[in-house]
Image (cartoon, rainbow, N blue to C red):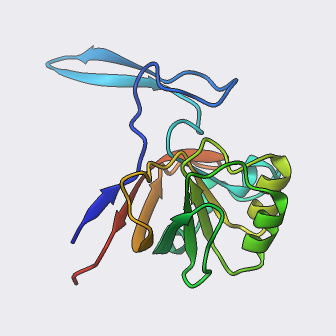
């Protein structure tokens, strides 16, 4: 079984979305051990957007069903997708046109990911999130061949948050 870690590493000086706070990690002595204090946006690195990112009172990241985040995913070149599996990751993605977001929102897709810092503008986000489609941004897909995989995308369980950093892996086969 091949495992692809498609998560962006978090480090000081990493690129962040314009206007977002920079990632910072400070080591703090704790007796004989060391702990780290983190400062970051919920949209730092690879992260998953929840409906509350754009809709007041909507579900937060802790309410996104895990079935949407642990499922089959198609990795494909932007903007093509087959719709044969519940999720799609786009390689070499650019800002999604609204027509693509509308097509995804009616296709049965439950999660969409991209290797760029954003799927697109406010209208694109709202179109996807109003259908409870999980948005996964800042993926590292360059070394992943196009095809189908098992996706495991686990965001930090931050109560009512609009998004959370996530570790996302793809498995090319599963042995049970």
Q: Along the line of sight, which residue is nearer the eye, 14 or 156?
A: 14
21 is higher (above) or lower (below) than 82 = above
Which quadrant of the rendered structure holds the C terminus?
bottom left
The mark tally for this picture is 0
Relative image position of residue 55 (x, y in whole percent)? 82, 52
Q: Residue at x 50, y 72 (%)?
A: 74
Taking the view exactly as shown, the residue that stands out farthest to the left is: 32
Q: Is residue 169 left or right of residue 155?
A: left
Q: Is residue 87 left or right of residue 10?
A: right
Q: Along the line of sight, which residue is nearer the eye, 63 or 111?
A: 111
Relative image position of residue 4 (x, y in whole percent)? 32, 58
8 is higher (above) or lower (below) than 40 = below
Inspect this view and state whether residue 152 appears.
yes
Q: Along the line of sight, which residue is nearer the eye, 172 or 79?
A: 79
Relative image position of residue 11 (x, y in whole percent)? 40, 26
Inspect this view and state whether residue 130 appears.
no
Q: Residue at x 27, y 62 (%)?
A: 3
Relative image position of residue 52 (x, y in whole percent)? 74, 52
Which quadrant of the rendered structure holds the N terminus?
bottom left
Q: Residue at x 43, y 68 (%)?
A: 151
């Amino acid at each position: 079984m091949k495992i692809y870690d498609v998560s962006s590493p978090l480090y000081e000086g990493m690129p962040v979305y314009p206007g977002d706070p920079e990632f910072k990690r400070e080591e703090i002595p704790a007796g004989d051990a060391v702990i780290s204090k983190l400062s970051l946006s919920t949209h730092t690195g690879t992260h998953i957007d929840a409906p509350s990112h754009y809709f007041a009172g909507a579900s937060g990241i802790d309410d996104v069903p895990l079935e949407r985040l642990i499922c089959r995913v198609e990795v494909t070149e932007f903007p093509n997708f087959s719709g044969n599996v519940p999720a799609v990751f786009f390689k070499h993605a650019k800002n999604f046109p609204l027509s693509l977001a509308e097509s995804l929102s009616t296709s049965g897709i439950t999660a969409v990911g991209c290797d760029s810092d954003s799927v697109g503008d406010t209208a694109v986000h709202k179109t996807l999130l109003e259908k409870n489609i999980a948005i996964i941004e800042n993926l590292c897909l360059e070394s992943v061949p196009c095809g189908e995989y098992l996706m495991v995308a686990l965001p930090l369980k931050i109560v009512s948050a609009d998004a959370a950093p996530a570790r996302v892996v793809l498995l090319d086969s599963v042995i049970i």
